[in-house]
Image (tube, coloured by chain):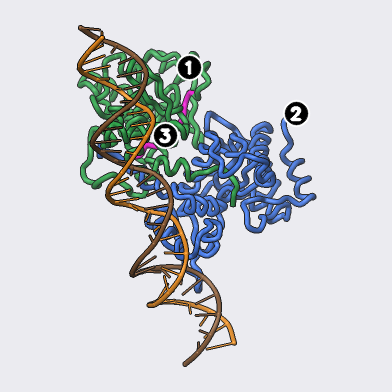
Chain colours: A green, B blue, C orange, D brown
DNA sequence: ACGATGCTTCGGTTACGATCGAAGTATGAA
DNA sequence: TTCATACTTCGATCGTAACCGAAGCATCGT
């Protein structure tokens, strides 16, 4: 049976706890240094260095050096999607990292997934966009309606401009905490950046959580109401 | 960093070569016995037994005993999708199982992916269905048009009947050999069974290849022509 | 030039898990 | 009952890879 691609290699790469923690941290979309990644992996810098070298050789990471720092990021969106889909799968099988206790409620509420909004708020946003007819959900796919295009324009997002990029405009991404889809793709990214720009939300310090300001939360909830 | 689901566990499960080979074999959709799986993994029966126990405990497999045999299958479609998406990812990073030589051309041409058709022919089928207007491809999603529904009726597939099942009708599945989408979901399954029923094609003995008869190939190609 | 910081490489230890031989259990056939 | 097949469990071996201490580069600040 020497046919087909080798799943075992990438499986083994993701299969080490230290590496898995690093990848999960990087799926927050931010570039991190080797030292930071060593911390999230719970290992020393030397060990982290060898791990990172393996991940890079395996095509999961890219690094760029900047001064005396080395910043690591996930290789591309496909890698981020793989990590996130494995998280969804693991959650569905009850493989939780420690105890299934209360966990981080803030993380379930709103967090970053690569470059877009996930968690309860991410799912709510997509639900609301679909319910109001701004996005068409056909089968597994999503597309922006003309109505939605003008509505997004009001929020300050130029959809036609996003369309010209090579990256898909809308993509649905399975949310591991909600087990439902939220909005990814360039539109998902644009929406989240808009929230940041308007000061409605900000990233938490050392985590993937997204924290809304009281005013931002009010705006967000009125902009994306739950269907009646 | 004790947040979120544990990717490392399933990563490690898939990360062992013997287990990965077993899973790849099972993603052919057929139930296999422990002895058969030991063969594809290249290990003894005892070792295979412990591997299979781990995979089952991890929620990747289910077994049902039948007489003195034990038949193993992938736990569900989500598992099959995960395996296949990892294959796609591995292929995109050039992780091939041995040498990237000529490989199995039959496997690239047509093979089973869980329960539907993949490979060159699988991709061609979806392309043709989209080009002829039988299936709408919106963003990442697929849906059958009224026109397509009547056309499929002629082949002998009752779409409205398939719609009533809980499983999604159309789903696109990334093909690792072609690096393009082919048709999965209940419609993909129905199409492949139809080909089998009509005697157009059959499964190869110990492989995931699908072999078309000369007559079946002719019918298939005329039914799903390439766009001009 | 000097030390400090960020990271890699080397060497050696350690631990985990994959592996198989042998023995044990279950089902079916004679 | 007896033997054969299909599989699991036990026990022991062995190899690999994760790990860290220490030393080696590279870059920056002063």
Q: Which residue is mark 3?
A: A55
Q: Secondary structure at mark 2?
A: loop
Q: Count of labels shown?
A: 3
Q: Which residues are the magenta region?
A: A169-178
Expressed as whole percent of the image width and height from the top left, the position of residue B139 reads: 53, 29
Q: Are marks 2 and 3 on the same chain?
A: no
Q: Is residue B138 above or below residue B205?
A: above
Residue A174 inside the magenta-drawn segment: yes
Question: In terms of sequence position, does the residue under pointer 3 or pointer 1 come before the other?
Answer: 3
| Quadrant in the rendering for residue B181 | top right
Q: Is residue C18 above or below residue A32?
A: below
Q: Are marks 1 and 2 on the same chain?
A: no
Identified at 40% across, 22% down, the residue is A189
Q: Is residue B194 above or below residue C22?
A: above
Out of A91 and B205, give the one closest to the viewer. Answer: B205
Expressed as whole percent of the image width and height from the top left, the position of residue B99 reads: 60, 41
Identified at 50% across, 33% down, the residue is A141
Expressed as whole percent of the image width and height from the top left, the position of residue A81 reads: 44, 33
Q: Is residue B122 left or right of residue B219?
A: left
**Mark 1 near mark 2, Cβ–Cβ under 8 Å?**
no
Q: How far apart are labels 1 and 2 at the CA level?
A: 31 Å
Q: Which residue is mark 1?
A: A162
- Give the chain of mark 3: A
Residue B150 in view, yes or no: no
Out of A169 and A97, give the one closest to the viewer. Answer: A97
Q: Which residue is mark 2?
A: B228
Q: Secondary structure at mark 3?
A: helix
Q: How far apart are labels 3 and 1 at the CA level?
A: 31 Å
Q: Which mark is residue B180?
A: none
| Quadrant in the rendering for residue B152 | top right
Residue A22 inside the magenta-drawn segment: no
Q: Around disc 2, counting alpha carbons within 10 Å, would you say few (fewer than 14), some (14 to 19), or many (20 or more)?
A: few
């Amino acid at each position: 049976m020497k046919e087909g691609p080798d799943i075992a290699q990438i499986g083994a790469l993701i299969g080490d706890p230290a590496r898995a923690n690093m990848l999960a941290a990087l799926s927050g979309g931010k570039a991190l240094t080797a030292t930071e990644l060593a911390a999230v992996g719970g290992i020393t810098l030397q060990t982290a260095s060898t791990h990172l070298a393996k991940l890079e050789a395996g095509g999961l990471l890219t690094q760029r050096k900047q001064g005396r720092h080395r910043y690591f990021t996930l290789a591309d969106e496909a890698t981020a999607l793989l990590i996130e889909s494995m998280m969804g799968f693991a959650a569905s099988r009850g493989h939780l990292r420690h105890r299934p206790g209360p966990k981080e409620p803030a993380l379930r509420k709103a967090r970053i997934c690569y470059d877009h909004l996930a968690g309860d708020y991410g799912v709510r946003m997509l639900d609301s966009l679909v319910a109001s007819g701004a996005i068409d959900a056909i089968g597994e796919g999503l597309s922006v309606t003309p109505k939605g295009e003008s509505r997004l324009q009001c929020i300050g997002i130029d959809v036609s401009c996003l369309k010209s990029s090579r990256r898909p405009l809308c993509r649905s991404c399975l949310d591991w905490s909600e087990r439902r889809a939220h909005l990814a793709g360039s539109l998902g990214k644009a929406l989240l950046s808009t929230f940041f720009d308007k000061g409605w939300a900000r990233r938490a310090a050392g985590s993937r959580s997204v924290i809304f300001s009281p005013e931002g939360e009010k705006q967000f909830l009125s902009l994306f109401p739950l269907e009646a």
